[in-house]
Every structure is written in structure tokens, then in C-alpha cells.
Image (spheres, rainbow, N blue to C red):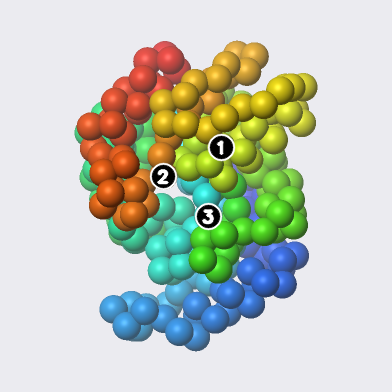
Amino acid sequence: MNKDFKVFQKTVFNCKKCPRLVSFRKKILKKKRKSYAHEDYWGKPVTGFGDLNAKLLLVGLAPAAHGATRTGRIFTGDKSAEFLYQCLYKVGLANQPTSTHRKDGLKLNKTYITAALKCVPPGDKPNPIELKNCSKFFDQELNFLLKVKVIVALGKVAFDACIKFFKQNYHLEGKFLFGHDVVYQVGNKYLLGCYHPSPRNVNTKRIDHQKMTALFKKAIKISN
């Protein structure tokens, strides 16, 4: 792995810039979910994972309280991950349809996954200051991914974070509305909006396997 990237990860793992998020992480460590009571929770900020030479980047909102905050890997060990990886596996972007823990053998194919916020926020609702504090980490992480051609934003918060990145780094101007399967071209890159694979969106049929896999197939086609 890139040495500079390892330094970046260590900096993120040690971050305590947002008091509310640090406090919430500590609360989660003390009040583990009963089904995971025997496990050692990660309890720190979470960076992305996957192929640093990826052509495709997926961006979520933040680590889940008993998912990535527990396992230490983004989109790992929760319901959103269960749905997401079934879809990624179907289109050939992952070598297995599950993401349960850091040493489960999961590998991504020309794909990298991260989140706009590196810590879990209460109620999955980060405040503007927290998003601003974490945006520097998000920008640094994206700057490691030099070959990315397509970014899929999973949800509006992730979409807005990507737009902010493009405005700061690509002199992008104007208003950009989030929507599922909405595509914007920025220079030689493309941004696709996608409904977040949350249990709420899945249960209400706002997103399903067919819609998600169709969008991933589109992203793969654009990236090739």
C-alpha cells in the first residue's frame, strides 16, 4: 500500500476535531448492541478501502454505528452493506456478495469505497461544521485516487460533498440537484446520483436490486 496513504489513514484514525462525534463514538463503545456485546468495537474514524487505482468510486454518508464503527471498514457489518454488496457482486465489482468484517477476504475490482464523513454522527445527521472539518480528509482521499473516472454518490449528503469537491478543485459553478440516476460530467469525470442503500430505502422499494445493479452497470460502461 502507498506509504503516503498509510500516513493519511493514521491521521484520520487519530482525529478528534469534532467533540460531538468523539462523544458519540465513546457512547457507542459503552453501549454495544447486544448481538455484538462480545466484540471489540473499532470505535475510531473510518477511511475508505479498495483499489487505489480504481476507475470507480462509491461515496456514502458516514460509518454506521454498529457497522463500520464496529468493524473498522466502511459499509461492513450492517444492513446497508448486505444490500450493497449483493449488487456489487452481481455486476462483478466485488469478489463476494458479503461484507462482514475486515478479514473476510473481500476484494473490490477497480473500485474504491469511502464516506463523506469519517465518523458516525448521531441520527446519521452531521452538522455543517462536522462536514466542513471532515471535507479536508475527503479531499485528500480523493486526491489519492488519480485514475477515478466515475463517482457514484450514495445519497444526497455524499452527492453534496462531491459537488463541493468539484467546485473547489475543478472550478465547477452552478446548481446541481441530487436524484437517482442523474449524471453530471465534470471535466473528464462523471458524477452519478444514487439512492442510499439504507434499510428504509430498501424496505420502501425506493431502491431495489434491479435499480442499483442497473446504475452500477451504467457506471462501469462510462468508466471503461
Depth check, mark 3 against mark 1: the one in front is 1
Disc number placed over residue 107 in the picture, else none: none
Pointer 1: what residue? 159
Q: Amino acid at mark 1?
A: Phe
Q: Is residue 139 visible?
A: yes
Q: Does dot 1 land on a helix, a strand or a loop?
A: helix
Q: Name the residue at 49% across, 85% down.
A: 30
Q: Are marks 2 and 1 in contact (CB under 8 Å)?
A: no
Crowd rating for badge 2 (residues with CA inside 10 Å; few <14, some 14–19, many 20+): many
Pointer 3: what residue? 62
Near-viewer residue (31 or 194): 194
Q: Amino acid at mark 3?
A: Ala
Indicate which disc, 3 or 1, sits on the residue closer to the N terminus. 3
Pointer 2: what residue? 196
As measured in the structure, the alpha-carbon distance from the residue carrying label 3 to the one carrying label 2 is 11 Å
Q: Position of residue 97 (x, y in %)?
A: 23, 45
